[in-house]
Amino acid sequence: MDRIDANALELKDKLVYLNRVAKVVKGGKRFSFNAIVVVGDGKGHVGIGLGKANEVPEAIRKAIEQAKKSLCRVPIEEGTIPYEVTGCYGAGRVFLRPASAGTGIIAGGAVRAVIEASGIHNVLTKCLGTSNPHNVVKATMEALKQLRSPEAVAELRGKHVQEVR
């Protein structure tokens, strides 16, 4: 899979989840922060990143850097996905189903952020298993990575696009 150049795209970032964690040491508690960020151009490119640091802005900056490195291409047809797909990561499972024009994005917090950043406008989703944002975001990305455009599927099978649809 080819790496996508993040500098060539107009990426927008969205903070999905910010978590304060505490490490108990001899002198008391040391606090640090985890940030999950989604970046996307709204035209079929999306990436996720996790950043950890002692300050919130630093954690977000690290997450954005990692998200730009993990960009992937999502096939979008008429504002929706080509077919149903399920993504799994840990205990999180996310089910994505194409929807007709005008439906909108029917999704909860973490899934909605990834779908909006990718540029999909009509989709039905369901989170199965856990609601942990870490696993849900990664499961959503797994589902989107499984998608192939009809042109790519036709090329793999050695057929015309009309035969595949």
Image (cartoon, rainbow, N blue to C red):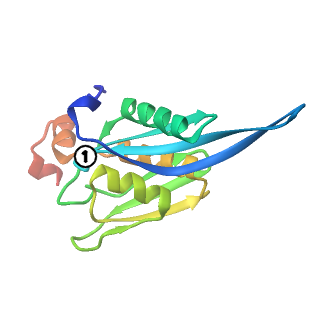
Rendering coords of residue 48 (x, y %): 43, 41
Identify the image quadrant of residue 31: top right
Rendering coords of residue 42 (x, y %): 25, 50
Q: Is residue 10 above or below residue 2?
A: below
Give the side of residue 9 with respect to residue 49, left or right.
Answer: left
Give the side of residue 41 with respect to residue 144, left or right.
Answer: left
Element at label 1: loop
Residue in view at x 52 percent, y 39 percent: 57
Viewer-closest of 54 and 7: 54
Q: Is residue 75 above or below residue 115?
A: above
Rendering coords of residue 60 (x, y %): 50, 39
Q: Number of labelled discs? A: 1
Rendering coords of residue 12 (x, y %): 32, 46
Residue in view at x 55 percent, y 43 percent: 35
Residue in view at x 75 percent, y 41 percent: 22
**In this view, which residue lies farthest toward the right?**
26
